[in-house]
Image (tube, grey):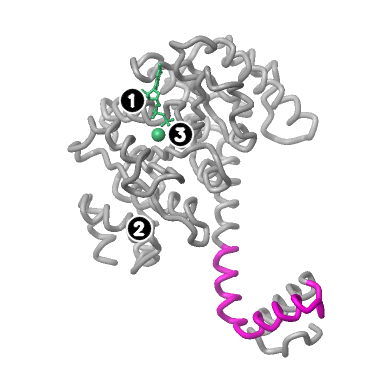
Amino acid sequence: MHPLAEKVLARDLRATARACRLVDDRAGDYAAILKDLFPHTGRAWVLGVTGNPGAGKSTLTDRLISVFRKQDRRVAVVAVDPTSPFTGGAILGDRIRMQAHFGDPDVFIRSLATRGALGGLSRSAVDVARVLDAWGADVVLVETVGVGQDELEITRTAHTTLVVAAPGMGDEVQAIKAGILECADVFAVNKADRDGADAAVRDLELMIALGGEVAKATGRARGHSAAALHARASAAPDPGGEPPAGPWVPAIARTVATRNEGVAALVEQLERHRAWLIGTEEGAARQEERLREAMHVQLRDALTDAAVAALGPTLDAAVHAVSRREVDPYTASERLVAAFRAGAGAPAPGAGA
Ligand SMILES: Nc1nc2c(ncn2[C@@H]2O[C@H](COP(=O)(O)OP(=O)(O)O)[C@@H](O)[C@H]2O)c(=O)[nH]1
Ligand SMILES: [Mg+2]
């Protein structure tokens, strides 16, 4: 086993920080470390926290850390901010906000900075979360700003996705990107101390009900019918009981993160979602679907790397041929695939496959 992987498993904080950095930078033996750690992962609950800048994600994340620590769970935070370098503004702000937990050896906070690498931020976030899972985190909180494709990708890889909205930021529901809405398992209407919280809750309820109708009409499995929404809303919360049956209906909690209000009820909803994932057929099916998506991404990257390396000049020739309009890119791709399958770069460029 890689010595660094061994130290991560022994809960060495310094080594874990180094492993995270290597994985984030895709540097050194990062792949060997990830391979060695993988058999020791799968225990952590990966909880995505997303939403527009200023909604209160960091404040709420800090509160969630406190709740989980009181339950004696080990917590890791992966903070992702596309606009800030590692030491820059927003991340520094997050660090200060979460300062209460510095010095707690069972809280590990890591900010990600990587841009531009293949798979970029989302790949880094997934892999760093795996390292922290192996380190022994019971919960990995991944805070990400709800903008951009990369962030959406991260949201897809979480077990449970919390979308934080706040009144007074315009039309809350409109302000949340459609893709993020589809990933939402639980909503927090934060800053409930401000005007407009009721309206935001109503908008979200309507949106969830409509989402269910649209899903039904298009035959998608993940429906949230108005009836199901009402059934859930009227049922008493029962965190210790049976997991909720049937498709998951996104839940809504009101919070005032700065005053620590509504946080317990929010955690209850998050736990209900976790129980659903673990304890129901639908939850298991969703987990498998997510794993399959992740495997496709991994496979696509690996195949692309392998093909680019193997085809070499054949690929260059194909690019030139397309740029001179001698061949269309569709046919060129088909020929490249054929060449790759036949043993990499054998046929002459432009030759029929
Ligand atoms: N009034 C009010 N302000 C809040 C609440 N939660 C967070 N804030 C404030 O909103 C600002 C942005 O919070 P932050 O957690 O950094 O948001 P993030 O960008 O989503 O991570 C900070 O000044 C917080 O103190 C809340 O529930 N009520
Ligand atoms: Mg933040």
Q: CA distance from mark 2 to mark 1?
A: 29 Å
Asked which secondary structure carries label 3, the reply is strand
Sequence-wise first label, 2 or 1? 2
Q: Quadrant of the N terminus?
A: bottom left
Query: What residue sits right under mark 2 in the picture?
Result: 37
Mark 2 lies within 8 Å of ligand 2 (Cβ measured): no
- The label shown at residue 63 is 1
Of residue 108 and residue 218, the one placed in the foreground of this image is 108
Identity of the residue drawn at 47% across and 32% down = 53
Q: Estimate how packed mark 3 is, as few (under 14), some (14 to 19) or many (20 or more) residues with alpha carbons within 10 Å.
A: many
Q: Amino acid at mark 3?
A: Val
What segment is highlighted magenta in the picture? 299-328
- The label shown at residue 49 is 3
Left/right placement of residue 46 relative to residue 308 reads: left
| Residue 281 appears anywhere in the view | no
Judge whether residue 85 is colored magenta.
Answer: no
Q: Estimate how packed mark 2 is, as few (under 14), some (14 to 19) or many (20 or more) residues with alpha carbons within 10 Å.
A: many
Q: CA distance from mark 2 to mark 3?
A: 25 Å
